[in-house]
Image (tube, coloured by chain):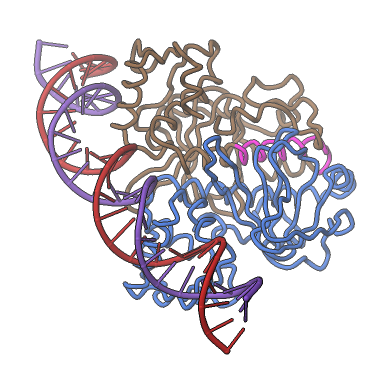
Chain colours: A blue, B brown, C purple, D red
DNA sequence: CGCTTAATTGATCAGGGTCAATCGTGGTGG
DNA sequence: CCACCACGATTGACCCTGATCAATTAAGCG
């Protein structure tokens, strides 16, 4: 559920020609001319807290985590972004979050200056940007909902179902991230995530052929768990 | 902290002439012509899950809560909005959240159709909208951070500090909402919220002259608690 | 002045965190 | 080729925070 699910169509009041999220670059992407491609290795920092907010990104391939480090060293992952997602919007001149490559990934970086100029001429660019920020908003809101009033099992189940949307076959998902990443995203510990997965397996809801692969053998049961 | 704190300036890359959040209507509000005023009594529904997303709102006075009801009847409050805040943006044609008046409040409702037309002519309107959605985004992200990895006392302390921003005198805050609202916002129970406040009072960090008023007698201590 | 609803306080319980040991899986080098 | 090592994941035992259940108090309001 966490937002990404509920988010796949363009809003009615704001026609977004060629608008498409979490898909490959649309054929007539108005932003195409304004961006430059960059590659990042596993764990590489894309931006850090305090950086200027003068550029945002589109994921071409790979997975990105956006997170915050607390004073006591603990980490909270705010969102994972996959191919097609646009991220890096923040009000204020300085970033309050950081972004890192979960695995090797390639991004297109857009300078806000340039895009702004583009938006001056082309109203479609404005709408596009608006849509992207709304996607991020919906995702963040869904994330809050997930973190607020749900038990560990519910969180993990919801995460699996959400992540399965990014899989070619919705029954087989490849986790791009570690258990620690999942834990930090769900506000749990690595042990609790592991225990939940093991329990799901015992209950016949999933299979864990290897550490990065999950087979959903009883999606319905997971869905009723995730509420 | 939860976002509202870190959010009070216009982003550098996107100049927003006359942009102002959580303040009274700016003298030259380009949206002024497009909105209609509406009043709501305590607890009144402003919009509900499933409603069309064809209108968004600006708070003129009072406080609004945006929330979601879970299948088991529990409620999660996503955000409180105060005078100056603009809310009600969602991707998708149907709302996934609902909004209610915490107390009597007045709002300006903007039809997206009209605003869109306005934005066609005036680039400043586009930027303004963009800024508003980013405010909401930052608030939602801050909320996730708050819910994720923090203890009960930290949450309540952070809430008080955050809410004190909406107060004329930052040392005296008037809670517009009930303990239940606070609990549902922080992902806690009403008992835990109450206990935290009592503990803060015992520790000399706050005073509770009456049920809706909190005096911050030791802000520094609260701040170090909220981390 | 009762009545209703919200808040506080107390006692108990359980979900999930913490600490610690073990297992598994690659990767490296003898 | 296999042994060893390092790191991530799993599992177990125990504990603590915050939820639950229940009683009491406080505050509006008719």
Q: Is residue B123 magenta?
A: yes
* Residue B30 image offset from top left, x and y in percent: 76, 30
Out of B49 and C20, give the one closest to the viewer: C20
Q: Is residue C9 left or right of residue B222?
A: left
Observer-nearest of B51 and C30: C30
Please tell me which residue lies in front, A170 or B65.
Answer: A170
Quarter of the figure with residue B42:
top left
Q: Main secondary structure of the magenta part?
A: helix
Residue positioned 71% across, 27% down in the render: B9
Image quadrant where residue B177 sits: top left
In magenta stretch: residue A107: no
Q: Residue at x 57, y 47 (%)?
A: A140
Q: Which residues are magenta?
A: B120-138
Query: How many badges with numbers are in the image?
Result: 0
Question: Measured from the top left, where is residue B6 in percent x and y?
Answer: 63, 30
Indicate left or right for C3 with A11 as reference. left
- The picture quadrant where one finds residue A208 is bottom left
Percent of width and height locating residue A16: 74, 56
Q: Residue at x 46, y 23 (%)?
A: B160
Residue B173 in the image: above or below residue B110: above
């Amino acid at each position: 559920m966490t937002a990404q699910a509920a988010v796949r169509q363009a809003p009615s009041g704001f026609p977004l020609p060629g608008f498409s999220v979490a898909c490959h670059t649309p054929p007539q992407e108005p932003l195409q001319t304004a961006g430059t491609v960059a590659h990042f290795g596993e764990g590489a920092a894309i931006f850090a807290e305090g950086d200027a907010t003068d550029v945002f990104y589109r994921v071409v391939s790979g997975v990105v985590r956006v997170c915050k480090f607390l004073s006591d060293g603990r980490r909270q992952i705010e969102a994972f972004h996959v191919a097609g997602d646009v991220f890096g919007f923040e009000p204020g001149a300085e970033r309050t979050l950081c972004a890192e490559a979960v695995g090797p990934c390639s991004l297109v970086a857009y300078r806000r200056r340039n895009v702004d100029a583009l938006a001056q001429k082309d109203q479609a660019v404005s709408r596009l940007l608006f849509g992207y920020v709304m996607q991020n908003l919906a995702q963040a809101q869904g994330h809050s909902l997930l973190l607020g009033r749900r038990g560990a099992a519910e969180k993990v189940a919801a995460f699996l179902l959400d992540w399965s949307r990014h899989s070619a076959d919705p029954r087989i998902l490849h986790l791009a991230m570690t258990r620690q990443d999942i834990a930090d995203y769900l506000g749990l510990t690595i042990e609790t995530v592991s225990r939940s997965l093991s329990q799901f397996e015992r209950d016949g809801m999933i299979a864990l052929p290897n550490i990065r692969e999950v087979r959903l053998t009883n999606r319905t049961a997971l869905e009723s768990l995730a509420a």
